[in-house]
Amino acid sequence: AQTVTQSQPEMSVQEAETVTLSCTYDTSENNYYLFWYKQPPSRQMILVIRQEAYKQQNATENRFSVNFQKAAKSFSLKISDSQLGDTAMYFCAFMKPSGGADGLTFGKGTHLIIQP
Amino acid sequence: GAVVSQHPSWVICKSGTSVKIECRSLDFQATTMFWYRQFPKQSLMLMATSNEGSKATYEQGVEKDKFLINHASLTLSTLTVTSAHPEDSSFYICSAPRRVLEAFFGQGTRLTVV
C-alpha cells in the first residue's frame, strides 16, 4: 500500500511571497501519478497540478510548479506570487497507474493562509 | 461549470434512518466512480469504488452493509447510509474520472445525524 505524508499542518505567508508545500510518499510502484489538490472553504476539490512519474520534467501551471524527486519520493508544490485566493487546504495525492481504475490516496493536508 | 454533480449538499437525518446521496457525471460517462469520506479538518479517505454493472469494491474497514453503493447507470452512482448513527456524520465526496488523470469531484455532502 502507498502512503502520502504532508508534514506541514499549517503555513502562513504574506501576499506576493513564494511558498513551498512539502509532500513525501512511499510506494513500491515504478510508474504512478501525483497530484496537488486545493480545497477552499467551499470544500470543492480543485486540481492544481499533476505529475506523471515517468516524466523527469517538473510540471508547471502558471504560478504553480512542482519539484518532483523520484528517488527521494518527494513531490513539493511551489506557489509563486501568492494571492489571497490561494488560501485553502492543499492535499498531495497519489494514484497507481491503473488508468483511473483506482482512487486517490491523500496526505493529511496543509492549511495555507495568505496574509494581506 | 461543474461536471460532477452531487446531491444533496447537506442533509440532517434522525438516528436510525437511511440517507441516499447521488453523484452524477453531467457531460461524460463514468464506468467508475469513487466515494470518499472527510472528517473535520482531516484528509479524504477512500471508502469504495463504484463500478457500473457490478458490485462496488470497498476499502478495508468500511462496512458494506452500512454504506450501500449502487452504480445504476453510466452517469449515476448512489451512496446510501443505512441506519445512520451520529458517528456517521461526516462530509462525503464523490469523484469520477472523465479521462485518465482527469478526475472531477462533486461538491460534497455534509451529513449530520441527530
Image: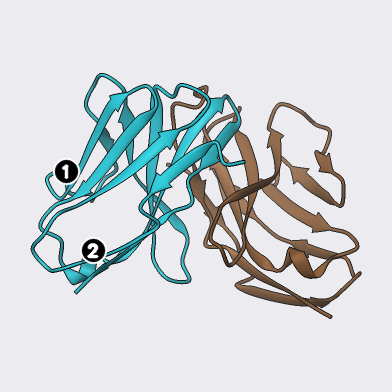
- The residue lying at 81 percent from left, 76 percent from top is A13
Of circles 2 and 1, the one toward us is 2
Please report whichever mark, 2 or 1, sits nearer to the chain's N-terminal start.
1
Q: Position of residue B103 (x, y in %)?
A: 55, 35
Chain colored brown: A
Label 2 to label 1, Cα distance in Å?
Answer: 14 Å
The answer to whether the residues at label 2 and label 1 have Cβ atoms under 8 Å apart is: no
Q: Quadrant of residue B50?
A: top left
Residue positioned most to the top: B53
Position of A8 with respect to B83 (left or right) is right
Note whether B82 is above or below B30 in the view shown: below
Q: Position of residue B90 (x, y in %)?
A: 33, 64
- Mark 1 falls within which chain? B
Note whether B82 is above or below A42 in the view shown: above
Residue A25, which numbered label? none
- The residue lying at 62 percent from left, 66 percent from top is A110
Q: Quadrant of the N terminus of chain B?
A: top right
Q: Position of residue B96 (x, y in %)?
A: 47, 34
Q: Amino acid at mark 1?
A: Lys
Position of B30 with respect to A77 (left or right) is left
Secondary structure of residue under mark 1: loop
Provide the residue designation for mark 2: B88
Q: Colour of chain B?
A: cyan
Secondary structure of residue under mark 2: helix
Provide the residue designation for mark 1: B64
